[in-house]
Amino acid sequence: MRRAVLCLSLGLSGCLPIAVAAMYGVSERAKEPAVCASRDECDAAWQKAIEWVAQRCAFKIRTQTESLVETEGPQPAPSNDVACRLERIPGAEAGTAQLELTATCGNWYGCTPDALYLKAAFNDEMRAAIAAARAPVAPNAPPA
């Protein structure tokens, strides 16, 4: 009986990340890229994206240009540390762009943090930063 419970528990534990990802729409959020609509907006978002990569990816930045940022790595297994590649892909209209993050590790069991979750978090934060840049700035209220 204990073996059956143990086997069932281990089998279901493999489904847990899939269920959690589905519940929070992680796959959809990871697929929905951050898109900026003007040169100024894209420049500001690009700087935030570079800071994001420097803070959240496991390896230091190796390459940094106006349209590409790459970290060192990944290391071979058993390392599950995440290496990142960030691209600024020009849009059809002048000044527009899409920010695209690719996260990888050398461990076929998976990365820590999970690459899908990392990409979803990146897209969420970049879309929020772009939206904040688009929001009108409220004038200063007169002193009371």
Image (tube, rainbow, N blue to C red):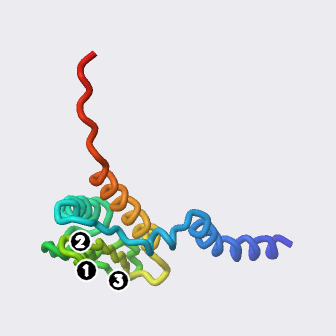
Quarter in which the N terminus is drawn: bottom right
What residue lies at 18% left-to-right and 70% top-to-bottom? 95
Number of numbered callouts drawn: 3
Q: Which mark is on residue 72?
A: none
What residue lies at 61% left-to-right and 65% top-to-bottom? 23
Q: Quadrant of residue 19?
A: bottom right
Q: Is residue 53 visible?
A: yes
* Of marks 3 and 1, the one in the foreground: 1
Vertical order, 131 against 39 (above or below): above
Q: Which mark is on residue 92?
A: 1
Q: Which mark is on residue 96?
A: 2
Classify 10 Å Cα crowding around label 1: few (below 14), some (14-19), many (20 and above): few
Calculate the distance from the C-alpha at mark 2 to the C-alpha at mark 1: 7 Å
Q: Outermost residue, left direction?
A: 65
Task: Identify which amino acid the numbered label 3 is placed on.
Answer: Pro
Q: Position of residue 60 (x, y in %)?
A: 22, 68
- The mark that comes first in sequence, 2 or 3, is 3
State if disc 3 and disc 2 touch (CB < 8 Å): no
- Secondary structure at numbered mark 2: loop
Which residue is label 3 attached to? 76
What residue lies at 28% left-to-right and 61% top-to-bottom? 52
State if disc 1 and disc 2 touch (CB < 8 Å): yes
Calculate the distance from the C-alpha at mark 2 to the C-alpha at mark 3: 36 Å
